Image (cartoon, helix red, strand yellow):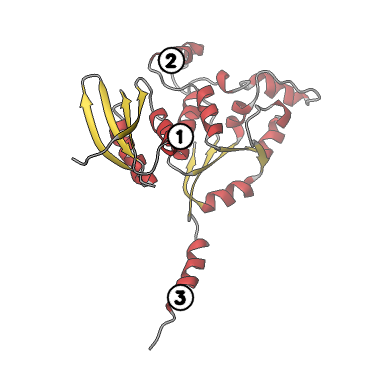
Amino acid sequence: MAEYTIAKTLDYKGLACPMPVVKISQQIGTVAVGDVIEVHTTDPGSLSDFPAWAKTMGHAIVETKQEPGVIKIFVKRQK
Amino acid sequence: MSVDVDKAIAELKVKVDGMPGAENKLTMVVLSGSMDKHLAAMVIATGAAAMGMKVVLFFTFWGLPALRSPQKKVGGKSFMGKMFGMMLPKGRNKLTLSQMNMGGLGTAMMKGLMKKKNVASLDEMYDVAAQLAVKIYACQMSMDLMDIRKEEMIDYPGLEVCGVATMLAHAKESSIQFFI
């Protein structure tokens, strides 16, 4: 597992499609290239949507954690 | 045999740039007038914008009344125009489900469910779409047909009226086209 520091944690719990992806797209520009944003979501669709979004946008999902009641997705700004 | 690589690349670039579907853009025709289909249209539009695509929506026929503002009124309409005005939904919040509407009960229940499950409403979707610079065009021909005026439409940033050629020009450049 790669080492990284979290620049920002965002709470998207309760939000449904397409809002988690819409919101991360608005937030990714607020951190520096190379920084990681930790996203908390309860939307299971985000498990496939965040990687799809990241692939399209040229960013990376460095880690995904499924914990009871919350999915944590770690998004790295790559450009 | 020698090949001028730079020249070949330049020629190729001109060809590729002129190819249909070369732009990272989504063009969607919104013809339907039901709430569920408008919700789908706006989810796709905002999602695509979030994925870095340019998004262009064309509202035509039954899709058009969703752009009417509930607050605005215009006078001087023809008899048929007034009839259409009365019969068609006055704005996006008056749209009903395409199935299981049950005289409005189904739509009300669906709106309640959406709130409970935290699915964004059409109002929120339009706000997000505006923030993400989703472009909306209204079809001039449908507007003439049903006597729907630009002055009675919502104050959406960059809302414009156009014809089929504008839509086709955008669709040709787009890598994705939808029809809802």
Crowd tier of the residue under label 3, counting other residues whose Cα lies within 10 Å: few below 14, some 14–19, many 20 or above: few
Q: Secondary structure at mark 2?
A: helix
Q: Is residue B6 above or below residue B84?
A: below
Q: Nearer the viewer, residue B164 or A8?
A: A8
- Residue at image location 64% in from the left, 20% down from the top: B87
Query: For mark 2, what is the residue?
Result: B115
**Chain to which the residue tagged by mark 2 belongs:** B
Q: Secondary structure at mark 3?
A: helix
Dot 3 amino acid type: Asp
Q: Secondary structure at mark 1?
A: helix
Callout in the foreground (2, 1): 1
Q: Nearer the viewer, residue B130 or B115?
A: B130
Q: Establish whether labels 1 and 3 are both on one chain.
A: no
- The residues bearing labels 1 and 3 have C-alpha atoms spaced at a distance of 39 Å
Which badge, 3 or 2, comes first in the chain's sequence?
3
**Chain to which the residue tagged by mark 3 belongs:** B
Mark number displayed over residue A26: 1
Query: For mark 3, what is the residue?
Result: B6
- Residue at image location 52% in from the left, 67% down from the top: B14
Rendering coords of residue B2 (x, y %): 40, 86
Hey, which quadrant is residue A29 in on the image? Answer: top left
Callout in the foreground (3, 2): 3
Contact, mark 3 vs mark 2 (Cβ under 8 Å): no
- Residue at image location 35% in from the left, 46% down from the top: A78
The answer to whether B50 appears left or right of B58 in the picture is left
**Chain to which the residue tagged by mark 1 belongs:** A
Dot 1 amino acid type: Gln
